[in-house]
Image (spheres, grey):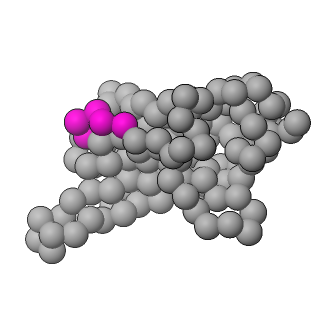
Amino acid sequence: QVQLVESGGGLGQAGGSLRLSCAASRSIFSFNTMGWYHQAAGKQRELVAAITRGGDRTYGDSVKGRFTISRDNAMNTVYLEMNSLKPEDTGVYYCNYKQYNPINSGFAEYWGQGTQVTVSS
């Protein structure tokens, strides 16, 4: 098991920046993919950004060029740097870690509790 704790949310202004952090309770070396999801009010959760163990990054179309995902293995933490914020970035951001389980050929999935981001225009 692993606990994920997000921080860094809050109120931002359009055009401004915020940085989210997701700290894991143990080493992140064993995780295959670490990512951030966004859930706006009344909408489904959607992928914002993900980074693999090998360092490959994926971004949702709405955040490409504005958000950057990174990780600090020594701190067991994944970050989401959010720049050029837009009001539509408002919502709850969840971090998500996936770990491959060779016993059942599936992935164990872990979620943080979520952190609220509100962007004012």
Question: Quarter-wise, where is residue 92 in the image?
Answer: bottom right
- Left or right, 4 with respect to 62, comes to left
- Left or right, 23 with respect to 100, comes to right
Quadrant including the N terminus: bottom left
Residue drawn at (33%, 56%), measured in percent from left and top?
98
> 79 and 75: which one is in front?
79
Is-magenta flag for residue 59? no
Do we see residue 15 in this rendering? Answer: yes
> 4 and 85: which one is in front?
85
Question: Quarter-wise, where is residue 42 in the image?
Answer: bottom right
Residue at the limit of the structure toward the front, as seen here: 61
Asked if residue 51 is positioned above or below residue 19 in the image, the reply reads below
Residue drawn at (58%, 62%), measured in percent from left and top?
45
> 86 and 82: which one is in front?
86
Span highlighted in magenta in the image: 53-57
Residue drawn at (32%, 31%), measured in percent from left and top?
73
- Left or right, 43 with respect to 118, comes to left
Q: Main secondary structure of the magenta part?
A: loop
Q: Position of residue 65 (x, y in %)?
A: 55, 29
